[in-house]
Amino acid sequence: MLIGLKEILGLAEEKKFCIPAFNVYNLETVKGVMNAAEKLRSPVILQFYSRLVTSGFAEGVAPIVLDFAHRSPVPVAFHLDHGAGEKEIVRSLRLGMTGIMYDGSALPLEENKQSTGAAVRLAGYVNVGVEGELGHVGKAADGDETVKAEYTDPAEAEEFIRETGVSALAVMVGTAHGRYKQAPMLDIARIRAIKERTDTPLVLHGGSGVPDEQIRAAVEAGVRKMNFSTDLCYSFLDGCRSRDKSIVGIDLFMEGEHSPIEAVQSFAESKIKVLGAENRA
Ligand SMILES: [Zn+2]
């Protein structure tokens, strides 16, 4: 069933586990993730990049997400990832999304607070919760440029949550977007320090490539939503490439051994298990 961001994160907070959030962009990725969530009885977040919404692509794929969510026995939230502004937010709400991320993390603190607060009010008119970001999660391709100054400060996080009214907060504790050149080292103590100051669910971006033991430690410390985009995309592409060349037509994309759908499903299953989300639906 389709539920809201606030409700799905409430389940995670109550039972102390983490909701997997997968970036999907076509039928095969949606189907692969839903197969995994239903097989393992896990609540799940399906999310769209902001660019999918501004490009007009989302109009075609959103109905697919909603159809799967409505027909599913597991709780599903449909979320906008890295919303850039009002245009993306309003379009996403119209497309039926039940969660919105507004990313003002590249702005100075006061501007981030103000624009995030405005996003919370806007989505609040239709009772949709907003995920904000404080501290800036950069790109893995930038490598060691990730400076400590961009890490989330626990006291600022408490203030940010209180002043903006966000339903979830993405924090910078050492992850990055994209493929890591070397395994990241998460600042688990910082997650704990932020968690001690707030009941609001914390979010980690850049989950792809984070070693399992660090993922478990982050969940233990209080992370309630973790995003996986890069590796889900690669699992889909690997599934396409490794297909037997004699397979043609519709069978190329249908389910079955080594299909793109199965590749996505198997990736999603591995993350659901490490997040402790299995049998939580
Ligand atoms: Zn992100």
Image (spheres, helix red, strand yellow):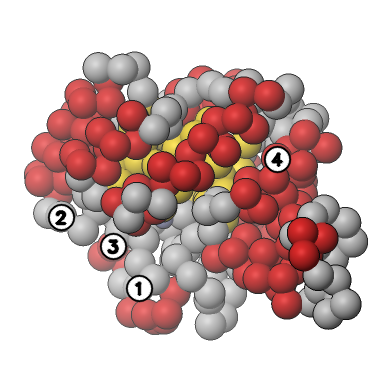
Q: Position of residue 81 (x, y in %)?
A: 40, 47
CA neighbours of label 4 inside 10 A, class few (<14), some (14 to 19), many (20+): many
In front: label 1 or label 4:
4
Of 76 and 51, the residue lying toward us = 51
Q: Position of residue 209 (x, y in %)?
A: 61, 68
Q: Residue at x 49, y 60 (%)?
A: 206
Residue to which mark 4 is pinned: 34
Q: How many marks?
A: 4
Say if residue 86 shows up in the picture.
Answer: yes
Residue to which mark 3 is pinned: 150
Secondary element at image label 1: loop
In front: label 1 or label 2:
2
The residues tagged by marks 4 and 2 sit, at their Cα atoms, a distance apart of 35 Å
Vertical position of residue 77 compared to residue 208: above or below? above
Secondary element at image label 2: loop
- Quarter in which the C terminus is drawn: top right
Residue to which mark 2 is pinned: 107
Q: Which mark is residue 146?
A: 1
Q: Residue at x 79, y 55 (%)?
A: 254
In terms of sequence position, does the residue under pointer 3 or pointer 4 come before the other? Answer: 4
CA neighbours of label 2 inside 10 A, class few (<14), some (14 to 19), many (20+): some
Q: Residue at x 77, y 65 (%)?
A: 249
Q: Position of residue 21 (x, y in %)?
A: 56, 45
